[in-house]
Amino acid sequence: MIEWIHPALVFFATAALVPFVKGKGKSILLIGFPALAFFSLMLFPDGNYGVFTIGGFEVVFGRVDKLSRVFAYVFTLMGSVGMVYALHVKQKGQHIAALIYGGGALGSIFAGDLLSLFVFWEIMAFSSVFLVWYGGEKSWANGLRYLMVHTFGGLCLLGGIVIFAGQTGSIAFNAIPASGLGGWLILIGFLINAGAPPLHAWLPDAYPVGSITGTIFLSSFTTKTAVYVLARGFAGTEVLMWVGVIMALYGVVYAMLENNIRKLLAYHIISQVGFMVAGIGVGTELAINGAVAHAFAHILYKALLMMGMGSVIFMTGKRKGTELGGLYRTMPLTFGLFMVGGFSISGVPFLSGFISKSMVISGAAAAHYPFVVLLLTLAAAGTFLSTTLKLPYAVFMGEDKGIKAADPPGNMLLGMGLAAFICILLGVMPNLLYQLLPFPVDYHPYTAEHLLGSFQLLLATLLGFTLFLYKLHPENTISVDTDWVYRKGVVWFQQLKNPLQGIKVLRYKDFLQGLTLFSRQVSQRIQSGYLKHALVMIISFVMLSTLLFSLFKGWTLSLDSLMQTDLTLSQLLVFVLIISSTLATVLFKSRIAAVLSLGMTGFFVAFFYVLMGAPDLALTQYLVEAVSVILILLAFYYLPAYFEEKTAPASKMTDIAVSLLVGIVMTFYMLMVMDSHLTKSIASYYLEMSEKLAGGRNVVNVVIVDFRGFDTMFEIAVFSIAALGIFGMLKLNKKKAPIQREAALNGSLKREQIEEAVQREVTSK
Amino acid sequence: MSRKQTPEDQVKKKKRVKVLASMLGLLMFLDWFAPRHHAHFFWDSIPGFSAVFGFIACAILVFFSKGIGHAFLMKREDYYDD
Amino acid sequence: MTSLIFKSITKTVSPILMIFSLYLLLRGHQMPGGGFIAGLMTSAGLVLIYLAYGCDFFDWHKRSRFFYYLFSGGLALSFLTGLAGLFIGGTFLKSGVAHVEMPFIHESWEFASAGIFDIGVYLVVCGVCVSLMTLLGEEE
């Protein structure tokens, strides 16, 4: 029996199957699979599933408990309902993006550790941006800004995770203290996704321009996932209370001014999420229950509202309040269903908003935060005012502009109907939701006090609306928000000009141009494409840095041990031979002679090993030397003939300097290592432990394959690369003029002779 | 901005206001009798407080938002298009 | 050189070399042997055939592809063994030891996962050496 199926996998699987289905099959797939995921959530008990240990860290893909489960319920439900609404969409890419997005959200919900959370977080960002882009060509810039802000948020999150994990040593995702750089960065990353000012502007920027059906999904997942992670990680963090209150008011104020019907709702999302964030900030059981309940209900009624406005856009093609009006006659069903959502969001009794929103406020009240209570109530009134009064008045009632419209097609109505049904259901039977909440619920919404309070608030707001209606007509404007900084602010900066004539103060654009030019020049110097330059750089850098490092560490060299070794005559002779053959290599003009004397050096070194009593080493050295000589000769066979090029003196000086540097540093290190008392010998450790730890008695093999397995792996990698190199050299150099081969072997032909010979070849063909 | 209100509208509006105000009055009266379970703050025990608060909230919101809106927030539609 | 003497010697010696090299591979952990030397032995055996019977006999050039796959496969195998160590719950390249009861011999043998790594090494050495030899021999 399978232990557990991750709902994200179901969503991903659905996405993978989308390209292959049509017609009825498509409907079944798109609606059925998320529904299956929804029902599957009821089958498995709480616990940690999908736990892997990677690199010493515990990665948990499936942390199931009440908190994650309730979010998963509403996400899968929304996936299904949203798909009902989106059935008519022909572009399969939209479905795929939405499903991957939903899967990413579910993955984030169930992530028990910060690493998998981050992975799914990014999956969400990169799949949701496509839903923005499917809104049309004009949405390209908005989507790009969305992506930029989310990537920035993701980076903050990653930085925070790394620092936090470094401090605590684990990546488990539980309560995170909001102190220290790591915790704060994680919090900022979460808040960006939640839409907290000042980094919230992506929300009203991107959501209104997404595709009609795409925005439904957009409004459901990103912000609520952020609410979940805040509830999990930062419950009770006091600053969140104030952030939430600011969000609640900020969103409502902007919503009051907004003309674009979906942008108004988008600002509203900020306001509602503010309620949730504030609830999390309060931190008591009631408040967090309220925040979670609010999130649950909000996903559904916000989706309903978005669906309603989406239908209006779908049928009329108009998005602005100034252009709409009087649609209640031509789109009655849409109007009705929309109002269910509108009443729900305002907290009208017998709908889902009433049972959830008031919980947050009661939670704040019970914890004795008077200002929070007052301000949130203010925001609640504002919600009613902007979403349920101003917006439908502008779109459905108000001036009849004689727009041709009708109710949208069946699937869209069905989607709205389902969402409305659930809103009503939860409102009438709140325990359905209450039993899913993380903490036990001792809250009774249907008391006289609460009912009367709500009705009073709502009616009073309605009264105010009626009185001030004249002030609330839609105006064809947009409102400036914090994204002004990166949209207009930068441009303004660029256009700074000094009034002093002719001299332009550093223009931002000029500055950038200069910077790129400089970088290009530096790159051209450093990466000239000449192998020699690269080698000189690499070698000198490595040598100098190691030298400096040891100087800093104060490692010194005592030559006593060197002076004290005995030197026999035979050893001395071998030394002399080695040195002379090395010199010969450098001084010979003929290439072959040089290679052969290089080989001789190797052979003499092998001889030295014999003298020192290591015959196996000597044998290896002989073999290796022989093979090297053969290979170098082979290389020469294919190299061009021009060996006599005069090298510039400057170049020669660099060569000499680098060789000296390498020689000195290596000698220094060799001597120091032999003399050092820095570390104790590891050989005894290997001898002792080889059988115990690795189950082998052949210590040499155990060392190669087990203890130093990493080295061996790279050795065989290098080996393979060498083979590939030889393959390339031999196979890819097909055409060769015979004269060049000969010249290569001799290596001493003068340039003119060779050129003549080549000319002869060419003309004779 | 504000539209010219025809006399018809004014009559309608007055009627609506009257209806709403009387409903509100009724609710405030009923509130006097409602048992208060959790009186956390001083205002919880005042009957009809929510009504008053709601009205003031509405007024604040409308005037405040439109106020700062017209002051500097609201711009013409093509403000960002260079 | 395709002299008769050479051919007959190869017929006997070459299989011995190859089997012996496998033996060396398998016993590498406990006694002298191991992946590197086993690979060299196997390639020695194969190259012996190549030298004795010439390049036409075995159609080396068509089969030379095989040896490239051999060494890339060996490299991959070693790397994957290392990765598998991650999932068993430790660091990269952590090895495990399993005790297996052999059916007829009634002894439990130890298999170390480092052995698989060693097999990868063996494949690489074998593949590289033989492909080198065949490449060099292909010219003319």
Image (tube, coloured by chain):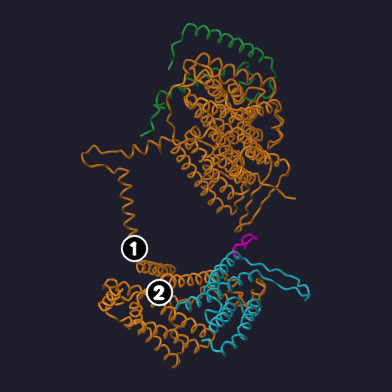
- Name the one closer to the observer, A432 or A665: A432
Quarter in which the C terminus of chain B is drawn: top left
- In the rendered image, the residue lying farthest to the bottom is A569
Can you see residue C64?
Answer: yes
Q: Amino acid at mark 2?
A: Val
Q: Identify the residue at image location x=50%, y=16%.
A: A400
Identify the residue under disc 2.
A665
Dot 2 surroundings within 10 Å: few (below 14), some, or many (20 or more)? Answer: some
Q: Position of residue A350 (x, y in %)?
A: 67, 23
Q: Which chain is cyan?
A: C
Chain name for mark 2: A
Q: Identify the residue at image location x=37%, y=39%.
A: A490
Image height check: is A395 above or below A634? above
Identify the residue under disc 1.
A528
Q: Which chain is orange?
A: A
Q: Amino acid at mark 1?
A: Ser
Tell me, yes or no, whether dots 2 and 1 are on the same chain: yes
- In the rendered image, the residue lying farthest to the front is A765
The answer to which quarter of the image holds residue A553 is: bottom left
Q: Position of residue A409 (x, y in %)?
A: 59, 27
Q: Position of residue A660 (x, y in %)?
A: 35, 76
Q: Earlier in the sequence, mark 2 or mark 1?
A: 1
The answer to which quarter of the image holds residue A376 is: top right
Magenta residues (range): C82-92
The answer to which quarter of the image holds residue A41 is: top right
Image height check: is C113 above or below A357? below
